[in-house]
Amino acid sequence: MENPGRKLSTSWVLVLFLGALLTDHLATGQLSSTFYDSTCPDLLSTVKSGLDSAAASDSRLGGSLLRLHFHDCFVNGCDASVLLDDTTTFTGEKTAGPNANSLRGFNVVDDIKASVEAICPATVSCADILAILARDGTVAAGGPSWTVELGRRDGLTASKSAAESDIPNPTTDVLALTSSFSNVGLDQTDLAALSGAHTFGKAQCGAFVGRLYDYQGTGSPDPSIDPDFLATLQAACPDGGDATVLNNLDQGTPTTFDNSYYNNLLTGKGLLNSDQVLETTAGTTQDLVTSFGSDQSAFFSQFATSMIKMGGISVLTGSSGEIRTNCRAVNS
């Protein structure tokens, strides 16, 4: 005879399991590409117009805006905390080591936010504007497009300490990079694909100068660097020189979004240690570097997929957070 208690217990477990599945679905399904269709139908065209206008005189802008979105999502999720100025109650993320004197594009975000507020007051979050700009800046440079999921709300605080600890370090190895990505729900495929954003943009000498003269305390340069490339970098970044001098991340097509970045890595011409180790470390990332280097379509497809995934990290939706009217400050 069937045990009634066992039947009840099994049924209850099934209910809990289905409830967990539903909860997980809702957590990942709260964003929607049609979120502003009725409340702000001209949002996408307004953002694109503002970007196009600003990018006409700044070829670096696409890479800078993509980086803003990346650095935002890795700290407390994609909540536009990276845009907040310091207050009397918290120190924001702009002066954190990974961001200080290197993140840019804040004024462009301010201008576009003002344009959006003019047509749709208190409706569109700064976090969503960042996500749209990351996509549009990529497309403007020749890269792939993707459907941006929308409906994020803005955070109420920021954290310099979290930015210091959570944003991946350009001097680290694949193990540490994998851990940083895993902490926010991204895997090694996402790591290899999203690193491809370094196909455009620039980096300061201070981010990689250690590779040129004293790699891992050896007193010698990183042996994985192509000798001619090493000489070029040492001329641009002399030991003890100006750490803020800018260098192209991609040695082939520095203002175009393509797969040249991966071919740089295959020839020992990755600028950052966190770039080159993707190719010199046997395993998933090394295989993907080879694959993406030979197949730009595969890179573009995975980059788009990984950007959508990254854009969903710990988002605030519903009644959480707020819709800031000024991206630099929480509402009064």
Image (cartoon, grey):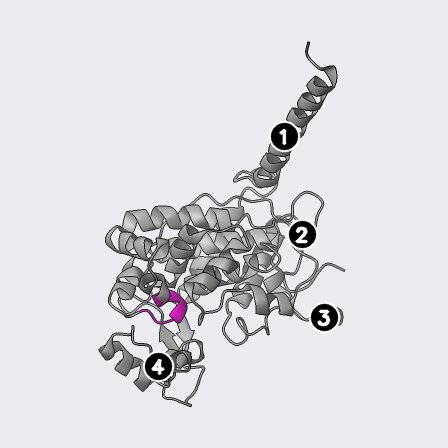
| Mark 3 or 4, nearer chain start | 3
Q: Earlier in the sequence, mark 2 or mark 4?
A: 4
Q: Contact, CB < 8 Å: mark 2 with mark 4? A: no
Tell me which residue sits at (41%, 67%) in the image. Answer: 274
Give the Cα distance between marks 3 and 2: 18 Å
SS at circle 4? helix
- Report the residue that reaches farthest toward the front: 1
Q: Residues within 10 Å of mark 1 (few under 14, many from 20)?
A: few
Three-letter amino acid code of the residue under disc 2: Ile
Residue 97: horizontal and vertical position, in percent? 55, 74
* Residue depth check, mark 3 versus mark 1: number of the one nearer the observer: 1
Q: Quadrant of residue 249?
A: bottom left
Q: Quadrant of the N terminus?
A: top right
Q: Earlier in the sequence, mark 4 or mark 1?
A: 1
Judging by the rendered image, the residue that carries numbered circle 3 is 87
What percent of the width, then of the height, locates residue 142? 33, 55
Image quarter of residue 282: bottom left
Specify the amino acid type for callout 3: Thr
Q: Nearer the viewer, mark 3 or mark 2?
A: 3
Residue that label 2 marks: 323
**Which label was assigned to residue 115?**
none
Q: Residues within 10 Å of mark 4 (few under 14, many from 20)?
A: many
Alpha carbon distance from label 4 to label 1: 54 Å
At numbered mark 2, what does the secondary structure look like: helix, strand or loop? loop
- The stretch of residues the image draws in magenta is 270-276
Residue type at mark 4 is Leu
Disc 4 target residue = 212
The Cα atoms of the two marked residues, 3 and 4, are separated by 39 Å
